[in-house]
Amino acid sequence: MPGIKGRPSHNSIDWTGVVVNSLTVVRRDTIRRGYWICSCACGNTCSVNSMSLKSGQLSCGCAKNRRALNFLDLTGQVFGRLTVLSLYKKESKPTRWFCMCSCGNEAIIYTTNLTCGRSKGCRHCSKRKDITGEKLGMLLALYAEDGVVTGRPPMWTFMCDCGKTIDGRVAEFHIGWLRSCGCHASAWMSWSAMMTRCYDETSNRYNSYGGRGITVCEQWHDFEQFALDMGNRPLDRNLGRRHAEKGYEPSNCFWELITENTPDTDANGQPTKNGLKKGALPRNRP
C-alpha cells in the first residue's frame, strides 16, 4: 500500500533483524508485498505485515493459543535473564516453569509470560537499575552486590576520584547525598555554606554577602571544580577571602585559621576586622 503523500510508506522500512516483542524479523516476504518473515520465540515462523510490526505485534499467535502453549517444551531455553530448568509440576497441562535467574534467584514463571517476553528476569531483578559506568560528583558506579537481595534496595560499590571505594544505594547516588568517599566532606560543607550565604535570600548571612554583591565565580558553582582548586579543608581552618569586597574565586580564597576566620562584616555590611577596607589586604592574611 503506498504511503501517505509527504510521509514514508511502511513498506519502505527495512525491518530485517528488528526484534518486536516475541518476533524477530528474518527477511522480507517475497510472495506477499509488505509482509515480513518472522521467527517467534515459541519456535514457529510467520508472515507479518509492516503495519502489525509497527504497532508492536506480540507473537505469531501463540500468545492467544494457550492450549498450544501447553505442549511446548521450554526446558533449557533462555528468556532474557531466565533459564528454564524444568516443569514446576508434572501436570497434564503444564503452564508454569521452574527457572533460574542470572542473579542466582529461582523463579516460577507462566509459559505465556516467557514466550511473549513479559518476563525477562525474576522479581528481584526487576527492581534493580543498572547504573554501571555512571559518574556523578567524584564517584563512578562500578558494580552491584551479588546474590538475591530482599527487603531493601541493592548496594552498589562506587570508586572515588581519590582512589578509594564506598558502598551506597542508587537513590543516594542520584539525589546527591553521595558525592565522594568522604575525602571532601569538609570541603563540601564549606562550599555549601558559601553558596547559601551568597544566593539564599532566606539565610541569616545573606545581607552581609549576597545582599551586598558578594558572588561566587561561575566555575565554582560546580563543587567538583571547587574541590579541585581548593583541595580538602584542613581540620583547623575555614574558607576565607583576602579581599572582603571581592567575591569567592581561586585568587581571592584560601583556607584560613578558624581563630582568625571571624565574619568579615556585620549585619549591616560594615567591616569587622582591623585594616579591612575596600581594596586593602589584611595584614594577617597571606
Image (cartoon, rainbow, N blue to C red):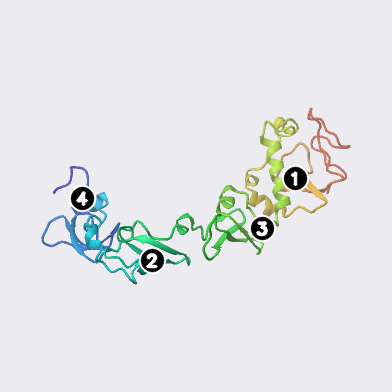
- For mark 4, what is the residue? 51
Mark 4 to mark 3: distance in Å? 52 Å
- Of marks 1 and 3, the one in the foreground: 3
Question: Which image quadrant is residue 138 in?
Answer: bottom right
Q: Secondary structure at mark 3?
A: loop
Mark 2 to mark 4: distance in Å? 36 Å
- For mark 1, what is the residue? 252
Name the side, left or right, on which 90 lies relative to 45: right
The image's mark for residue 98 is 2
Q: Which residue reaches farthest left?
A: 31
- Tell me if residue 269 can be seen: yes
Q: Amino acid at mark 4?
A: Met
Image coordinates of residue 144 in percent, x first then y, are 54, 62
Q: Amino acid at mark 2?
A: Phe
Question: Which image quadrant is residue 139 in?
Answer: bottom right
Mark toward the start of the polypeptide (2 vs 3): 2
Give the camera-side residue of 116 and 236: 116
Mark toward the start of the polypeptide (1 vs 4): 4
The image's mark for residue 181 is 3
